[in-house]
Image (cartoon, helix red, strand yellow):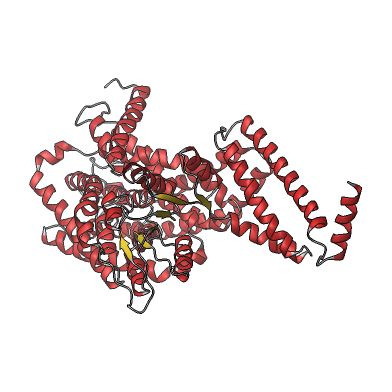
Amino acid sequence: MTGSLLFEAIMFLLGAIICVSIAKRLGLSSVIGYLLAGVLIGPYVLGFIGEEGEDILHFAEFGVVMMLFLIGLEIEPKNFWNMRKTILGMGGIQVGGTMLLSYLLFTFLGYDWEVALVISMAVALSSTAIAMQTIKEKGLMETTFGTSAFSILLFQDIIVIFMIGIMPLLSNSNTETQTDGHTESVSLIESLPLVLQTIAIILSVVVIIALGRYVIVPMLRKVAKTDVRELLIAAAFLIVFGISFIMELVGISPALGAFLGGVVLSNSEFKHELESTLEPFKNLLLGLFFMAVGASINFIVIAKSPLTIGGVLIAIIILKAVVLFVTGRVFNLKLDQKLLLTFSLSQVGEFAFVLLSFAFGLNILEQQEMDMLLVITALSMALTPIISIVNERFILPKVGTKESIKRPMDHIAKSQKIILVGFGNFGSTVGRFLRSHGVEATILDQDSNRVDFLRKMGFEVYYGDATRLDLLESAGIAEAKILIIATNRLSVTKAITKIVNEKYPHIELMIRTKNREDAYELLNLGHENFYRESLDTSLALASDVLHKLGFRKYTLKRQVKNFIKYDETSLRRLAKAPKRDEEYIFKARKELKKQEELLDADFKRGIVDFDNHWDSDHIRKALEKSNTKM
């Protein structure tokens, strides 16, 4: 509209703030908000962003680059080996099955076999950016669906390397004879014979692995010694951009290079520091990527052949959905988990842009084919959040596990006055301890495979999202006395507490928290009954250490109780203080000193008053001597 870079930046930020806020208020994924914002400000609707939208898309791909680098950091070789059956099995069936059916479809439509093969490779890839963002937002990473989706996406991210490697072999001509309509490539290997191009691509992967081990890690160690945080941030960007640049020079997707770099660094001591440094930038650039995808939807191309594009789009989504559903069935996923997998990964992903552009540069695709396929890819990504909403709102509630299995008649059963949300590691411990004392709890969980297993164990379980009031009511929230929230996501906890407090204020809430920061937020929202998951375990370990040094168990148990009492009091005093300024640091240090003085006084008083028999004579004598001097 104005050509000003500042104006375009304002439009992107304003569009994101307005559309994502509306999407979240309506209970939708942030991805659909970003996509809608991109469509609105793009060249084909309001026109705030013009033809330069394609350049913005290339820049925004750095969000995908960073995301794959961070995914690579999470994949330690040991964990990858443990997941090999799921990754190779589910990923192999999905990619192989989708490629086969897509190849048959496009061959039937009259495309040459080389073109049909390239398109089938692009269609087989789903959107890691959309799927992972949605899974993390909804807290489904630990479910059967979450791990299955991650395995398939991981296999796709790896197989792209080989797809790009073999693509030069499909080219009918050398890059020197490209048509005028094709974009000139800046690849260093473009002048090489096709076989040597493939070898060069494979060698570049080996170079990335060697750089990670023998150059990047030693460099990070030297940077860390300076103790300057800005340098470590600069080093993190240098790693991502440097690897991406190297891969781009040899004609490979920068995102794939970043993924490999992340895997190489996953066992280094800088893993967590790199994750925390790049995470905020990744989220911002991913949002820009989704907006750029929305802006790149070419409505002129759609208007020229709407029936063809619509028909191919629907055929691809259905084709992928069938393969994904069969994949879930082969691996014995429950129906709802299969549906989540089917609707979440049935789109064509961001790597299709890379593959199709690469194929266009090699003269495999014509301009018209390229334009149509790019529009179909963007539309499939834009439709994914909408399809997922239809699945979650209208299909899953009808097919999810709802009926509870009654307990055996010979088992003592009481009325379920307790509802337990989440039956993971924390929730299962709570539930089993209650059950061992004859107290039953109605359990809510989002993993239907886990629900099915729990019912076989005799627990009364409901499948579904506990942030839905209708599910809580079907579980008996109106008659319940206590609601235990054992999930590990603060956003889910806050959503549940909000609807329960509004509709059923008589329910007593008992809430799991991951850490002190979450406890602060819950306190400020007025919740008193919260339980930090690591507190008791940490104190148990410290207590055992002291016992091995000769301290008496009775004294340690009493001191653990005192520590918890003083720490809870301190927590409440610090809850309202700002957490990032000097005032908080001053108050926190003052509280720590006061807490240590109280514990020391309790300890020394307890020696004389109660603890006349010690497991360690030298500790007893030393402390008695200290107390006498006082």
Residue at the spot 47% in from the left edge and 43% down from the top edge? 527
The front one of 541 and 483 is 483
- In the displayed structure, does residue 153 sit left or right of residue 267? left
Residue 53, relative to residue 335: is it above or below?
above
Question: Can you name the residue that lies furthest to the top here?
Answer: 2
- In the displayed structure, does residue 33 sit left or right of residue 488? left
Report x, y in % for residue 357: 29, 47
Report x, y in % for residue 51: 26, 31
Q: Quadrant of residue 196?
A: bottom left
Disc count in the image? 0
Report x, y in % for residue 324: 25, 63
Residue at the spot 50% in from the left edge and 41% down from the top edge? 523
- In the displayed structure, does residue 270 sit left or right of residue 202? right
Q: Quadrant of residue 325?
A: bottom left
The front one of 104 and 491 is 491
Residue 511, relative to residue 54: is it above or below?
below
Residue at the spot 53% in from the left edge and 41% down from the top edge? 520
- In the displayed structure, does residue 512 sit left or right of residue 64? right
The front one of 610 and 111 is 610
Residue 262, relative to residue 85: is it above or below?
above
Q: Quadrant of the N terminus?
A: top left
Q: Quadrant of residue 455?
A: bottom left
Question: Can you name the residue that lies furthest to the bottom here?
Answer: 410
Res. 187 visible in picture: no
Res. 468 visible in picture: yes
Report x, y in % for residue 310: 12, 48
The front one of 189 and 225 is 225
